[in-house]
Amino acid sequence: MATTGITKLRVKWVKSSIGYAQDQKDTIRALGLRKLHQIVEHNDQPAVRGMIRKVNHLVQVEEIAE
């Protein structure tokens, strides 16, 4: 199988959003995260990068090449 060169982002929710603004809680949900320590994968796109930047203190991110 040949690699397509698409970069994905693996996002893990590592810190609770309790005590943070509602828009940050909404961003966590928009990323598809429902439970603490859950991991989701997204294509590397500017919109996703922006959401991650907004909640970078609550999540852990790693790039994976496919």
Image (cartoon, grey):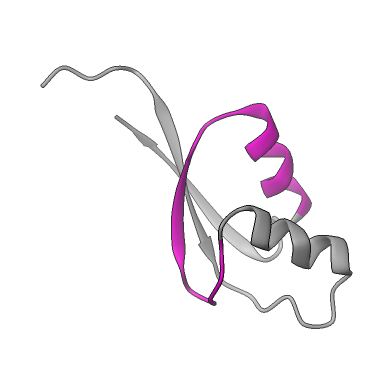
In the image, farthest residue toward the bottom? 18
The stretch drawn in magenta includes residue 59? no
Q: Is residue 1 left or right of residue 55?
A: left
- Residue 48 is situated, as x and y percent measured from the top left of the image, at 64, 39
Q: Which residues are magenta?
A: 33-54
Determine the residue positioned at 78% across, 51% down.
Answer: 54
Quarter of the figure that contains the N terminus: top left
Determine the residue positioned at 46% across, 69% down.
Answer: 38
- Up-down: is 26 above or below 5? below
Determine the residue positioned at 73% across, 56% down.
Answer: 27
- Residue 31 is situated, as x and y percent measured from the top left of the image, at 61, 53
Q: Nearer the viewer, residue 43 or 64?
A: 43
Determine the residue positioned at 77% across, 82% down.
Answer: 18
Q: Is residue 24 left or right of residue 7?
A: right
In the image, farthest residue toward the right? 21
- Residue 35 is situated, as x and y percent measured from the top left of the image, at 53, 76
Q: Quadrant of residue 26?
A: bottom right
Quarter of the figure that contains the C terminus: top left
Q: Is residue 13 left or right of residue 22?
A: left
Q: Nearer the viewer, residue 33 or 62?
A: 33
